[in-house]
Image (tube, rainbow, N blue to C red):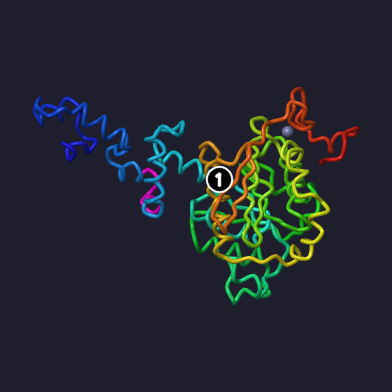
Amino acid sequence: MITLLDGTRTYAEIQRSVGDSQPLGEVLQILTEERLLSRVGHLEGSFAKLGDERAEFYDRQLRLLQDFCDQGLTDLPTGVQLQERVDRSTAVVCGVGGLGGWVALSLANAGVGTIRLCDFDRVEPSNLTRQTLFSVADVGASKVEAAGARLRAANPFVTVETFDRRVTSPADLADLVDGADIVINAIDLPTPNDTSTWVSEACWPDVPHILGTGYAYHIGVLGTTVLPGQTACWTCVRTETFADHGRDRMESLVGKREKAGAIGALCGLVGSILAWEAIRVLAGLPPALSGRWSEVDFWPLEIRSRPIPRRPDCPTCGKGRDGVPPSHRPDGPAPV
Ligand SMILES: [Zn+2]
């Protein structure tokens, strides 16, 4: 019976072939519950709509995307349509160091159509143990140029745009985020909170963004995904988390933050989670990191999360607001 479920026969034809003694309905119910059925009968045939080269390149990923469709997790019926959505999208990766490099590589692998990279730095020998886009031959080169070459080599179907630029304000990001579908902040200097505030202001209220992420020693911060108008915004998040880590107790750790301990394996874990989150947003799948703040402790390998609700009185996204961040209003308070 199962060999007849190849998408070319109707229910009645299969029932006639196996005879009335075999309970087709029951078998289909079990297969459905076990998620072993796909709505598309001839998967490779549906993949071919992308063209032979892309269909072959994305084969395994298309099977995963199709599975999301089969489980009813998306608004589209086929994995090919989800892939086309990703193909048409534009992602901005701010900072291509320890986290941003892994994010950018995974987005390129997934086929995000246009990837914009922004960084001002040059590759140093001490980067190579954790910054996956660079090799020994790249030492001294512009990070965005070396990263761009690596991504183009990884996937010939994506376009990579590079911005050799230091970000010190929201204005520095205006042209990068224009028309983007997702912006991921992976700039950690002067602090992840400062740069996240700039990215949030540059993106608000049009562009989804992933902010507040970071990694040092054995702790990864997964930050949060902001879908403007739908989820808690960066101001909501900062209001909730501002009191974390008493200022006095942080003093003794300042010296450790300057050149934080890090290893490529853990950079890759945090960066890959962020890339997966970005791909979900670009494919129109529900995000996993919205409305919450999560930290991974890699020592016991545990993720700790807490909910971050939208605040009704939030000066940025609260009820009745005009969608303009407070620092952009002539009479508004400074951002938190
Ligand atoms: Zn808010």
Asked if the magenta segment contains residue 50, the reply would be yes
Residue type, mark 1 in image: Glu
Asked whether, in this view, residue 327 is left or right of residue 55, the answer is: right
Asked whether mark 1 lies closer than 8 Å to ligand 1, one says no
Residue 293 in the image: x percent, y percent? Answer: 64, 43
Residue 295 in the image: x percent, y percent? Answer: 62, 49
Residue visible at 81% across and 41% down? 336
Of residues 110 and 30, the one drawn nearer to the viewer in this rendering: 30
Asked whether, in this view, residue 28 is left or right of residue 93, the answer is: left
CA neighbours of label 1 inside 10 A, class few (<14), some (14 to 19), many (20+): many
Residue visible at 57% across and 73% down? 135
| Residue at the spot of label 1 | 277
Asked if the magenta segment contains residue 138, the reply would be no
Q: Which residues are magenta?
A: 49-55
Which quadrant: the N terminus? top left
**How many numbered discs?**
1
The local secondary structure at tag 1 comes to helix
Residue 322 in the image: x percent, y percent? Answer: 77, 27
Residue 261 in the image: x percent, y percent? Answer: 67, 66
The quadrant holding residue 78 is top left
